[in-house]
Amino acid sequence: MFDVIVAGGGPTGCMLAGELRLHGLRVLVLEKEAEPTKFVRALGLHVRSIEVMDQRGLLERFLALGTQYPLRGFFAGIAKPVPERLDTAHGYVLGITQTTIDRLLEEHAVEAGAEIRRGCELVGLSQDDDEVTAELSDGTRLRSRYLVGCDGGRSTVRKLLGVGFPGEPSRTETLLGEMAVAATQDELTAVMTEVRKTQLRFGAMPLGDGVYRVIVPAEGVAEDRSVPPTLEEFKRQLQAVAGTDFGVHSPRWLSRFGDATRLAERYRVGRVLLAGDAAHIHPPTGGQGLNLGVQDAFNLGWKLAAAVAGWAPEGLLDSYETERRPVAADVLDNTRAQIELMSTAPGAQAVRRLVSELMDFEEVNRYLTEKIIAIGVRYDFGEGHELLGRRMRDVGLKRGRLYALMHEGRGLLLDQTGRLSVAGWADRVDHVVDVSEELDVPAVLLRPDGHVAWVGDDQQDLLGHLPRWFGAPIS
């Protein structure tokens, strides 16, 4: 009997497994693929995901294998300078391949004590009031208290639950692959500079040893996107878009992706939940997909652990959907808007020029940048201080850094007054008496995911807010 079975061993599933293990849960990750994928779809982590890794003490691992790049205009590829004074201590993009992200998160989950079984495909499930039964393709049946589907856009878990996945089908398709290129870098640069003046879904990024990551619009939308394109199809589209195929040959892998947007009607059915691409799919514009899934897991992990441990207040687990589903809906909207702005149609180009002019206003640029890097997310905790519902950035304290105190995944009261107490919740909330020149409020109560649950200096007011997120006190 497991506490939680996670279906899907990608970044969302492994991040969730690591979060659950922080609280001592018995976790099993089922991954149907026998070997890690070699496809590199995502190329980095945005600011909020970098913060998430820092909050759990994982960031140094990622920094060691990635490259820090300055923030730039991400919205529809409109080049603008980064807004000044972004509210983060990590004002950069971390360039790191998805295969490396997957490996690091899997290693972390295993080190934390999660069990990962590869080559195990979930084909059926049933549940009652107390547990979930998962059926594997080899006939094995496994029981757990909860199950989370992190099994991608074609999620078996979502389909077995009968959860609707409404949205818009793909209208455009893009080819992506890694292959050798015979043309010189100068030739590539000259062609890309000209073509990308109007066609932003085109490019070739060097990977070393004459191999490039190539992206080009497809001729149409394939009936079955799971069937990879051929090298000949790549050559044909390169000729059509760029006037040359660059002598591409010897592909490592070839793939295709569309611009469909779909959002699960529900994130939870009883003891089964959905996260990552199983709950939402959208175009890859802005590089938000992997990041969105990791952040789903970060929101869900501590809430699911609280439910298993028995101290979760009423509605806490349901708040996963009420908080994260609107975030996903917003990402679907902004990616679809970006796709429209990247169209070569005259009307779309006119709107793109207008948006570019608007982004010269600092607040517009900041607003759109914060959407992409996900530091503008604010959950609805009701009326209150402007920090309420927002994640707290890493601030310097007299005795260190805030995020260094959050590695265990517990709540945290940062108390600059020294007069407050979390007695009764000390098993769930750490009380840190320290001061920060960067924080102009007397005290903040942070949830395990770093979002601000309370601001103030009144003990009775604090006692009124602690049960909402951390359940009843221990008497």
Image (cartoon, rainbow, N blue to C red):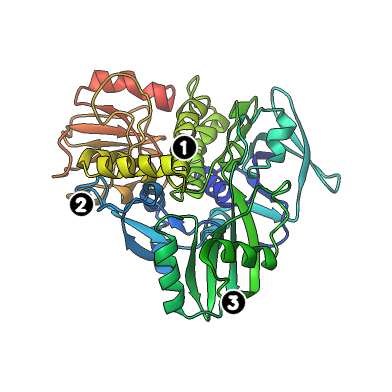
In the image, 35: left or right of 11?
right
Residue 61: where, in percent of width, then height? Answer: 43, 63
Local SS, label 3: loop
Number of the label disc, if any, that sits on residue 472: none
Kindly identify the residue that appears in the image at 52 percent across and 81 percent down: 209
Q: Quadrant of residue 386?
A: top left
Toward the viewer: 352 or 417? 352
Mark earlier in primary sequence (2, 1): 1
Q: Amino acid at mark 3?
A: Gly
Residue designated by label 2: 399
Residue designated by label 1: 299
Residue 232 in the image: above or below residue 303:
below
Kindly identify the residue that appears in the image at 42 percent across and 43 percent down: 346
In the image, 147: left or right of 209?
right
Mark earlier in primary sequence (3, 1): 3
Mark earlier in primary sequence (3, 2): 3
- CB contact under 8 Å: marks 2 and 1: no
Q: Amino acid at mark 1?
A: Asn
Q: Amino acid at mark 2?
A: Arg
Kindly identify the residue that appears in the image at 33 percent across and 19 percent down: 382
Marks 3 and 1, Cα distance to the nearest angstrom? 46 Å
Residue 238 in the image: above or below residue 46:
below
Kindly identify the residue that appears in the image at 26 percent across and 21 percent down: 384
Toward the viewer: 90 or 218? 218
